[in-house]
Image: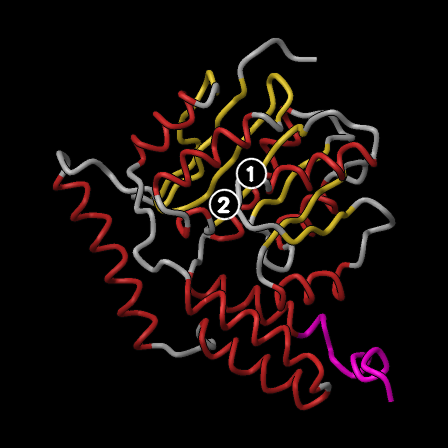
């Protein structure tokens, strides 16, 4: 029996639901953040907009956007082979509206693949870029460069929406303390009420299940584990003020937080230039 036949025994939708469950358990405001981002795109972009779901994982944002805006298209881009496999098998290509790409944001040439997709669908630029709980993996210098690279993909008036933890300035110790206490209380609650599997538990479970069904998928997990082992765990830890400055330097003329819970934010940046 070939690999494709074996893969039919994997319940892809089950694993997507478990992904969403463990993500939402550790970030209870996840769906609220998503909805703020999608509503912003719906309000400020045309119904047939094309959006980049950057560092997409299995395509959680793309799945919701394509449902809410039935004329839209998304480019779902990530570096993790397992999450891309899960997304592709669960969501497919949404009748040609969903385009999957494997990109490495640490490679300055990652935008070439985005431009190729845009060209293939008759577009010159993106209407919006959305990212959630992902860009903190980049070192601060690389984050600054990525913002500049994103600006070159967007049309004038295009949007960047980044949902992530973005710290207060050190000159605001009370604010920093409040944000830390909120994290500590959430962590304590999670430790007290183990109602959902954790991030690592999910990864262990999906690897065990998939490989028991189709051992040929081992290569995907080997690549995932290698990527994770060499990942820079210092994180960028860029301050919110640095995000704002970097975006302004990249050519975004309007930048501000549009949703916030302590240092958990959705930041909106609007690309300079006259709208099309």
Contact between marks 2 and 1 (CB within 8 A): the answer is: yes
Tell me the tag on residue 241. none
Q: Residue at x 70, y 34 (%)?
A: 115
What is the crowding at mark 1: few (fewer than 14 residues within 10 Å), some, or many (at least 20)? Answer: many
Q: Quadrant of the C terminus?
A: top right
Q: Give, as a single range, the part of the protein colored magenta.
A: 1-14
Quadrant of the rendered image containing residue 126: top right
Instruction: Compute the Cα span from label 2 to label 1.
Output: 6 Å
Which residue sits at x=44%, y=74%?
A: 198
Would you place residue 96 above or below residue 172 in this image?
below
Is 80 in front, or is 128? 80
Would residue 93 be found to the left or right of residue 152 on screen? Answer: right
Q: Which residue is mark 2?
A: 33
Is residue 150 depicted above or below 263 in this figure?
A: above
- In the rendering, at what x and y percent does residue 261 appear? 35, 44
- Residue 199 locus on image (x, y percent): 46, 71
Screen quadrant of the N terminus: bottom right
Query: Judging from the image, what secondary structure is the residue with disc 2 in?
Result: helix
Q: Residues within 10 Å of mark 2 (few under 14, many from 20)?
A: many
In the rendered structure, the answer to whether residue 137 lies left or right of residue 123 reads: left
Q: Mark 1: which secondary structure? A: helix
Residue with the mark numbered 1: 37
**Coloration of the structure image:** secondary structure
């Amino acid at each position: 029996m070939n690999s494709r036949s074996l893969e039919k025994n994997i319940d892809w939708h089950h694993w997507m639901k478990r992904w969403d469950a463990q993500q939402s358990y550790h970030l209870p405001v996840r769906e609220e953040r998503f909805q703020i981002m999608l509503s912003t795109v719906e309000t400020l972009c045309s119904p047939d907009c094309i959006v980049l779901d950057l560092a997409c994982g299995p395509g959680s944002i793309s799945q919701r956007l394509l449902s809410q805006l039935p004329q839209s298209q998304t480019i779902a881009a990530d570096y993790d082979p397992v999450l891309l496999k899960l997304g592709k098998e669960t969501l497919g290509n949404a009748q040609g509206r969903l385009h999957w790409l494997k990109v490495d944001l640490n490679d300055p040439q990652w935008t070439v693949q985005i431009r190729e997709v845009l060209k293939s669908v008759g577009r010159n630029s993106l209407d919006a870029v959305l990212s959630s709980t992902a860009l903190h993996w980049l070192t601060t210098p690389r984050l600054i460069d990525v913002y500049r690279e994103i600006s070159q993909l967007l049309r004038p008036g295009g949007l960047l929406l980044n949902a992530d933890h973005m710290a207060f300035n050190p000159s605001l110790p009370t604010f920093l303390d409040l944000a830390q206490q909120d994290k500590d209380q959430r962590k304590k609650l999670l430790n007290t009420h183990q109602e959902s599997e954790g991030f690592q538990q999910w990864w262990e479970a999906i690897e065990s299940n998939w490989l028991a069904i189709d051992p040929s998928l081992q290569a995907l997990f080997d690549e995932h584990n290698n990527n994770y082992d060499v990942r820079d765990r210092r994180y960028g830890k860029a301050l919110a003020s640095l995000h704002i400055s970097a975006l302004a330097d990249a050519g975004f003329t309007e930048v501000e937080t549009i949703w916030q819970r302590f240092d958990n934010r959705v930041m909106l940046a609007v690309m300079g230039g006259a709208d099309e």
